[in-house]
Image: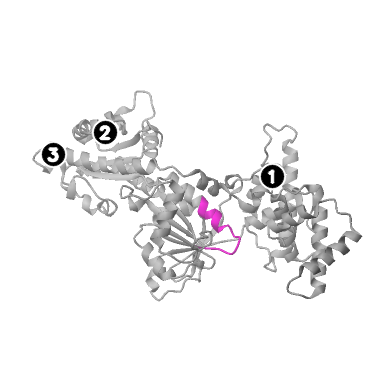
Amino acid sequence: MKQNEKLKLFIGYSHLDEGYIDEFRKHIAPLKNNGLIEDWYDRKIIAGQDFQDNIDNNLENADIICLFFSANFLSSSACIKEKKNALKLRKKKGVAVIPVILSACGWLDDKEISSLLVLPIDGKPVSGIADSNTAWHDVYIGIKGVIEKEIKIKQLIITEQFSSFLQNTELLAKAHSQKEKVLLDDIFVYPELEKYDDLREYEKKDSAEKLIEDFYDYPKILVAGEDQSGKTSLCKKIFVELRKKNFVPLYISYISDKTNPYQGKIENKISKAYQEQYGILPTEEIDKRKIVPIIDDFHFAKSKEKHIHDLSSYDHQIVVVDDIYSLNFKDENLIKSFTHFKIKEFIPSLRNELIKKWTHLTDKKNDVSHNENEIYRNIDNTTELVNTALGKVIGSGIMPAHPFFILSVISASETFGKPLDQEITSQGYCYQAFIYMYLRKQGVKNDEIDTYINFLTKFAFFFYNEKKDELSIDDFNCFMESYLDKYNFPIKQETLLKNLQQESVI
């Protein structure tokens, strides 16, 4: 939130209650004078403007929505529609919705509203309080508290280091031939998810984007996915989107926490994540209902049942594991309280979307050297390459159609101008693609690739023939002597070994 940015407060009411609204606007004047809020109601619409469009746009852009309930409000179809849209925004974007009871009416029979905290205190109508100033001051104090909490959350700034992590595509970061650094936003495509019921029986397909959109419908979410299926990338995207909704997401990985990855109290991990990701320690001023722990690699955690139990103090939580059946608890109610999702492999339409994103990436601005026909021809050729590579191995289940593998195939071909070897096994596709990408990450030039690949091929064959679990220094020196007798070695031996060792290729 910028220094002078005001929260937008939307007023929803029946025109028959306009006198109450005039009083309300007088009482919130200090909040406006202090630059905290800017209120809006339909009397601000000027002649000639589209009435309904103005209401819808201001409702959509509101940070806080105040709905003023009375018999007049409840009997108005326009007001009821406004209420429904406000509650949708509460679910979709986390917008604060505050019901204010103006006069005695049947608001308690509205299940959606009666579940919310209303003003004045205890839902006593403004008209039922002898001193109206006391009633409105009660409303003022309640709204001021909400505003202060919203501002605290809006002013949270993600640290630079964690912002870099959210955009980091790791091995794919240096894998593009036309772009120096590939960011997650450049290539992310929402995967399809399989949704399961509380008995872990398949229910239906859903989009990960829809899951985020309907976040309020799923307080506890369990996401499962195979290795390299994009679980961490999805965690990052969920983090970014929830932050836009003014939630306070906290990302915790049970594998990247090098100090104590597998154990420790979940609250300590949450406090540490808070400090690393927002640069401050959590305070009581932050509404805990807005905090969303996103627990990645949870299948590596010890005392899983205890951690899940400890997480129950948070209204929302997202737990990510490798397999939907990997959590077997004595207390089955703990796991039944989660809605289960599983990341699916990319169907052809999603693969095509991913390929288009990758193909259009470039660091060149206004590049006129590539016309539209060239771009589409490139997309067609790349799609054919992916279909050939993946199509050949999907049936055997070796290389699944997840983004990482799809882009590995493309990168290995385009970055180095080399297609993957058509004669090698499906496992070989994986290894060859990964080796190309690791070398690219180390800054190895295209014209040096053949030297590295030839070296690795001969070294692997030598190792295989030795029939040993590991080679001694003497063994390795013997190999190097025979290798240098047969092949030119245009790269310094120290440089080659350093690059291979740093990326753990050898």
Determine if residue 214 is in view.
no
Of 447 and 148, nearer the camera is: 447
Residue at which label 3 appears: 134
Residue at which label 1 appears: 359
Q: CA distance from mark 1 to mark 2?
A: 51 Å
**Residue type indicated by callout 1:** Thr
Of 29 and 172, nearer the camera is: 172
Q: Secondary structure at mark 1?
A: helix
User: Considering the image in quadrants, where does the C terminus appear?
Assistant: bottom right
Of 266 and 376, nearer the camera is: 266
Q: Are marks 2 and 3 in contact (CB under 8 Å)?
A: no
Mark carried by residue 346: none
Coloring basis for residues:
one colour
Q: Whole-percent x and y of residue 341?
A: 49, 62
Which portion, as a residue range, is magenta?
Answer: 223-236
**Residue type indicated by callout 2:** Leu
Compared with residue 414, is residue 147 higher up or lower down, i.e. above or below?
A: above
Q: Nearer the viewer, mark 2 or mark 3?
A: 2
Q: Residue at x 68, y 63 (%)?
A: 399
Residue at which label 2 appears: 31
User: Considering the image in quadrants, where does the N terminus appear?
Assistant: top left
**Residue type indicated by callout 3:** Thr
Q: CA distance from mark 2 to mark 3?
A: 17 Å
- Which of the 4 image quarters holds residue 305? bottom left
Horizontal arrangement in the rendering, residue 413 relative to residue 335 (left or right): right
Q: Secondary structure at mark 3?
A: helix
